[in-house]
Image: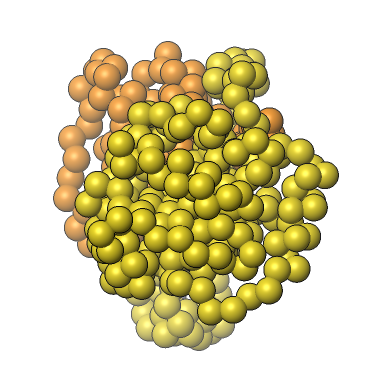
Chain colours: A yellow, B orange
Amino acid sequence: MTCPEARALLDRLLDGALDPVEERALGDHLAACATCRGRADAEGRLEAAIAGALSEPGPDADAAWERAMARLPAPRRSRAPVVAAAAGLLLAGAAALWLALPRHREVDLAAALLACHGDLLANRVTLTEAPIGEACRSLRSRIEGLPKLPPALPEGFILAGSGVCYRDGTPIGYLAVHRGAAPLSVAVLPPASRAAFPEAWARVESPGGLFHCRASGLSFCAFRADDGLAAALGDVSPADLEALAGAWRR
Amino acid sequence: MSDLCDEFRALCEAVRRPLLAFCRHAVWRADDAEDLLQSALLTAWRRFGEFRPGTNFRAWVFRIAALEARNVNRRSRGAPLPEEEPPGRAPDVVEMLEREWDYEALLADPETVVARLSGEVRVALGTLTPNERSVLLLRAIGDLAYREIGDALSMPLGSVMGFLSRARRKMRERLTEAARARGLVGESPRGSP
Ligand SMILES: [Zn+2]
């Protein structure tokens, strides 16, 4: 390696972006060439000095930060808190129950939703609190072909939060819903999910378009939602889940 | 919901200084810095549900800030921006610097020279094209890896390297000129011919 070749690689050396072959070749050159070694050191210091100068937030920056933070929409008091934060004791109990439930081979989508539900109870999911219309827009902008959410949930069901969760690389529109004190997990899937969840799709292809089962001691219900699929899971009665499904099937 | 809010605030707090600095320098009109900060934080908060815990929040939030910077700069077009040049191959610093001796003199004590030219750093930034500027800021302030910069700006890795390399060359040239103009670096250390 010549000195100009070595110098052309110095930036990427500083950025930790050399491939192993380049790194070895440059390392050999720097070991043998004090001039390039000095240049590498000095340019590293120069870039650090420039980065340091650029990293000054400037006068009044902290006041601007406080103003910007204060302008973030505040949590709405009238809304139910997100499930995971709802009632620590209740959830601690629910999580313990969930962990203790027996596991056996579940319908594919029930297994996926059980995993999401476990994450919810263990406080491992980050959800956005927003009205259902906004949740609908947000989820549909992130998952292609996702069926619409209903304009409102049935009486007695409260949307606590929404987000996207991934199971084996398949994005699932995810809603955390309250039914009284019971947390429910709801999944909404686009037509393209047929390949990932063939069993659930086959079950809802029946005349009623609705499929019930028990999954690890919880009620599970899958149903058609427009040209997609939705499912709900929770420690509630099958009738409750059917009432929730009614919002999509109206 | 305060849990989520607290989590968001805590994550933001950890990148407060670099994010403030990015907003300060990523806008083409200094007046727009606060506007950018507010849009970036608001968008990040609205889209926080997309952030996957355990992944790199810094890269995630800087990506949003970079997108918002484009919007803010587009809305607020003051002076015409320097025109974009194709990324091309990485230039050779040794060939490109006209005043190699002065540059070497600057390299003898880069911290002192840059400290005395801190105003010139901002001026030098103004000579970069929008892409060069974004890439440089995401690297220098955001500490993003090339791949993260490519994701943030939707550009291939080769372009990231090209823009970054040219941005650095321009910054070095500009600072070398300024250092020479202020007498911070002298004549050729090896004497005039
Ligand atoms: Zn050398």
Q: Foreground: A45 or A77?
A: A77
Residue occupying image coordinates x 26% and y 63%? A205
**Which residue sits furthest right?**
A89
User: Quadrant location of the N terminus of chain B?
Assistant: top right
Q: Foreground: A140 or A215?
A: A215
Residue occupying image coordinates x 46% and y 37%? B47
Residue A168 sits in quarter: bottom left
Residue A11 shows in this picture: no
> A133 left or right of A95?
left
Q: Foreground: A143 or B95?
A: A143
Residue A9 sits in quarter: bottom left
> A162 left or right of A138?
right
Residue occupying image coordinates x 40% and y 57%? A222
Residue A115 sits above or below residue A190 on the image:
below
Residue occupying image coordinates x 23% and y 27%? B81
Residue B39 shows in this picture: yes
Q: Foreground: A158 or B73?
A: A158
Where is residue A78 drawn, in percent x and y?
61, 18
Q: How many marks?
A: 0
Where is residue A27 drawn, in percent x and y?
52, 81
Where is residue A95 drawn, in percent x and y?
74, 56
User: Quadrant location of the C terminus of chain B?
Assistant: bottom left
Residue B29 sits above or below residue A214 on the image:
above
Where is residue B133 drawn, in percent x and y?
35, 39
